[in-house]
Structure formats: C-alpha cells, structure tokens
Amino acid sequence: MEFFTVLLSGLLAGIGPTGLILDQVIESQLHNRLPGSETITVRVDNRPNHQVLQGKVDRIRLATAGLQLTPYLRLHTLELETDPVSVDLATLRRGGNPRASLRQPLNAATRLVIHEDDLNATLAAPEFQERLQGVVTRLGARLSPGEQYQLGDLAVNFTETGRVEVTATVKSSQETIVVALAGALAVEEGHQIALVEPALTLNGNRLPPFVEAIALENLQRPFDLTSLERQGLFVRILQLKIESEQLAIAGFVRLTP
C-alpha cells in the first residue's frame, strides 16, 4: 500500500501552486521519491488545458523500467494509465496523504513485470529473511517437534513452462536439507492468487502424501487482495503469466478517497 501512496504523491505533485502540470515535473517528483529508479516516463493528457486550474486531468500515463519502490523492492516494468483524475488543490497543497485530495476514486489500468533476479534480491533482504525463517520454524515444529531448523540459501525461478520453482537450503543440528517447491499460479475470482499443482521434494525425493499435505497446508492458502480494500485500495487481476525468468501481471486498480 505504501508504494501506491508514493506513486500517487509523485503523479499529483505536478499540480503546483500555479495550477500547471508538466510531464517533466511529475517525472522529477517520482525520481525524487523513488531514488535508484532507471527510467520513468510520464505523459499527461488534458483538454482543455485550463481545467487543470480546477484540479482536473483527463489522463495520466506512466511507463517505467527498473522502478526502485523501496531499497529492497524493484520492479522490472510498471505501466499505468489512469481514467480522468479530479483532486482538491487546496487539500493537495497542504500535504499529508494524497488520497485525501481525491474528489472521486482514482481508476487505473496497470501492468507490471517482476524479474526473478529482483525477487530474489527482495527475499534476501533482512526483513524478509526474518519472516521466512518464521515460516520454516513453524513448519519444522509440525513435521519434527523438538528440532531447530535454520533457513539458508533461497532462490526463485520462473520457468518457460509457466511454473514457479522455489529452492531453499534448510539446516538442522543433524543435516542439511534441500527443499524444492514447484507449482503454477492461478488467479481466482480476480482477487486471489493460488498455488496449484504443487510438488514438494526433500533432497530430490517426493514426500509421502500425508507429510506433503501438512507442509503444503499453509503454502496453498490463496493470497487475497481484498485485504487491501480496508486501506482504500481495490485491486483486480485480469491476467497473470509466468514466462522464462519473469512474472507478468495485468490488472485494474482503484484508489478511493
């Protein structure tokens, strides 16, 4: 949710004290808010031009490459095209959350591409390693009570066959285990992403069905995007496609005031 706020701040920051919008100003604002980003291109459509004085814009188009949303989160590609935008200029200039300046919901079509190298860099970040270690600890407690497991190397691979493969090294006091999980990703009802047709192996060997069922119980629980709606963000996925080394998602986003 935070990075949508950053993007919205940058997109709307071009509405300056004079009420003029300049593509270059918005691009500069986004570069300032998202340091380390490679390419950010903004196009603003506005007819007639004077309606910007009332805080209205016909359309904003954003195209990026190598977008650095946080120090640990990078998108290979992000493209966004809005419906008409209407904001209260006085509220916007006071600062704070830019959502408060919206007179009406902000709708946008989006497309993003995540490269496996960027995803692996994110998973290697300390904050994510801590979360993943918690998952390993809980699974280990269920499968082998009393034993302590430590997460080692972790890598994600997007294959040309449309599957995602996750390989992790897990160490205990007795041995080192290579855990491999492979499966496809499916979109359910536009707002859930689920792992389907999963296969789980330890050191290259498939687990007994009852053990695999225990291990996959949490991993197969769909990720539900409706949880974002409490924060005013409505997201629906129109298409999800895994290709060699990357994951591409096309969807629709609505940000409410």
Image: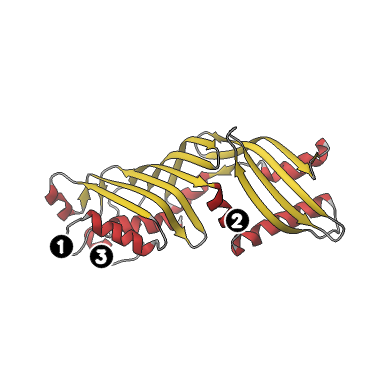
Residue to which mark 1 is pinned:
18
**Front-most of residues 100 and 236:** 236
User: Callout 3 environment at 10 Å: few (<14), some (14 to 19), or many (20+)?
Assistant: some
Position of residue 220 in the picture relative to residue 121 (left or right): right
Can residue 14 be seen in the rendering of this structure?
A: no
Residue 39, horizontal then vertical, whole percent: 36, 53
Secondary structure under the numbered disc 3 in the rendered image:
helix
Residue 33, horizontal then vertical, whole percent: 37, 63
**Front-most of residues 50 and 229:** 50
**Front-most of residues 79 and 221:** 79
Label 2 or label 1, whichever comes before in sequence order: 1
Give the distance between the C-alpha atoms of the residues marked 3 and 1, in whole angstroms. 11 Å
Residue depicted at x 70% and y 59%: 133
Label 3 or label 1, whichever comes before in sequence order: 1
Residue depicted at x 72% and y 42%: 216
Residue to which mark 3 is pinned:
93
Secondary structure under the numbered disc 1 in the rendered image:
loop
Residue 10, horizontal then vertical, whole percent: 32, 58
Residue depicted at x 61% and y 59%: 124
Residue to which mark 2 is pinned:
123
Amino acid at circle 2: Leu
Give the distance between the C-alpha atoms of the residues marked 2 and 1, in whole angstroms. 43 Å
From the image, state whether disc 3 or disc 1 is nearer to you. 1
User: Callout 2 environment at 10 Å: few (<14), some (14 to 19), or many (20+)?
Assistant: many
Label 2 or label 3, whichever comes before in sequence order: 3
Q: How many marks?
A: 3
Mark sitting on residue 26: none
Position of residue 82 in the picture relative to residue 139 (left or right): left
- 179 above or below 153? above
